Image (spheres, rainbow, N blue to C red):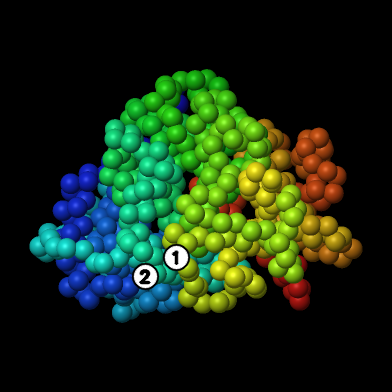
Amino acid sequence: MTTLPDIQTDYLDRIQLDRDARRLASALQGHGIGPNRVVAVLMRNDIRYFTITEACRYVGARFVVLNWHAPGPEIRAILDDSGAELIFGHSELLQAAASALPATLRRVEVPTRATESCALGTSLEQLIAEHEPMRGLAENLRGIFPYTSGSTGLPKGILRGFERVPGDVWDIYRDLSQTFLDLTPGDRLYVCAPLYHTAPNGIAQFAVAGGQADLLIGARFDAEHFLATIQRERITHVYLVPTMMVRLLKLPDAVRNRYDLSSLRFAVSTGAPCSRMVKDAINDWLGPILREAYGASETSFMTYIRADESRLKPGSVGRPINGTVLRILDDQLRECPVGETGTVYIHQPRFGPFAYTNAAGALPQQSVDGFVTVGDIGRLDADGYLYLSDRKKDMIISGGVNIFPAEIEAALLQLDSVADCAVFGIPDDEFGESICACIQPMLGAVEDPEAIRSQLKPLLAGFKIPKRIEFRAQLPREDSGKIFKRRLRDPFWEGRSRRI
């Protein structure tokens, strides 16, 4: 039998959460942190994360969650741009990022099981122990202050206009725990995707706000450990991204059949496009439990599709939810006819408007008559279901033909020899761009580009088959499904005056 990795998992204790968060809120106030002030968080997945975010909610502060994989200059750019005045971090991560932290930034260490002591100064536990609980709450939740992934330059901060939303946004989170996640008393939600990403962060926060279900946080994702946790804890709800699903499906049948997953009745996927084959395979294995959501850090979740709808509308990411209105516009900002592909524009009144803290890399024509776009390409059918093609910024134009990498990546992930992949455009003197695929092979797989192309022929049109295929031991893709394609793509464009 496989020896499973030791991955930390912890349940949220709601009584302790409220007690500690109110004490920490008092400490924040003592440090001058109040409405619309900013704190930063540099932590791996940890149940203490919610003590910090709840304390921020109680005083009306915003919190910036930093990707601890990010290089120092990117962390420093976010800290400078956000105006963060205090940072909470796991001890070893603060030490690793020390050169990127402004000298004036106050630091609070959060110990982990591996580092139970704090050596740099103030600790989270110390602040909680030294302060009396705060009484009362700030008027409005400000919540997460997300930053884009930086794929078009330095990350951009996304400031949501919660002040212009009627009522408390926490009430919206509480409602979404039921209408979006179907959480009821006694349910157990398991989240092990990185909380520094907006989607798993939001899913977990919805559960916290709902107050009805148990929330289990895992430090990281491992396919077999994930199944073992569902069996051991009788998990009812899970958060998944397509990369996780692919890794689960590629487990040997003997491993997949080893675990009792009968408690599981709900899975929600976000973060990256999910191929029809992967969705169908998950639903065939686990039952019709998978629901796919489409959203963005700027606008929260916008559409939603159930398993039964996915069978009827293959390839769709669902219909608008939460009062969202969608429009598909062409390059001249004219409404596209039903079924025609264009740029997806969204009106999402429930979470209020947003603005970037800096305009570097912002999309042209991002806002039109109260509708905004994050650069996604798609179409609506006659029933109002949305189908996404790709991100405009990722689109490859080869010989005047628009090619969407997501379609090619989905086909590659169907191949038994492919563990992970990233597809992007590289310079081509004849066609402008040609298709390059970087592949992380399955353990023991033969690295044969021609075999890959041959297997893709029944799945893709000839002009979509990658001209160049490279193999990499690891790709810069995180468990969230996000790929840092710029790190793969940029070397091919060095020394050229254009990037497309």
Q: Toward which corner of the image does residue 186 lie, by quadrant?
A: top left
Across and down, in percent, residue 167 comes to 33, 62
Q: Is residue 355 left or right of residue 127?
A: right
- The residue at 79%/41% (across/down) is 460
Q: Is residue 437 left or right of residue 320?
A: right
Across and down, in percent, residue 363 comes to 63, 70
Q: Toward which corner of the image does residue 145 lie, by quadrant?
A: bottom left
Across and down, in percent, residue 425 comes to 75, 59
Q: Nearest the camera: 338 or 476?
A: 338
Q: Which residue is mark 1?
A: 352
Q: Is residue 292 left or right of residue 160?
A: right
Quadrant where the C terminus sits is bottom right
- The residue at 41%/74% (across/down) is 82
Q: Residue furthest right?
A: 430
Across and down, in percent, residue 316 comes to 64, 43
Q: For the residue marked with disc 1, what is the amino acid?
A: Gly
Instruction: Please indicate, yes or no, whether residue 170 appears anywhere in the rendered image.
Output: yes
Total labels: the figure holds: 2
Q: Nearest the camera: 124 or 461?
A: 461
Q: Which residue is mark 2?
A: 163
Q: Residues within 10 Å of mark 2 (few under 14, many from 20)?
A: some
Classify mark 2: helix, strand or loop.
Answer: helix
Q: For the residue marked with disc 2, what is the amino acid?
A: Glu
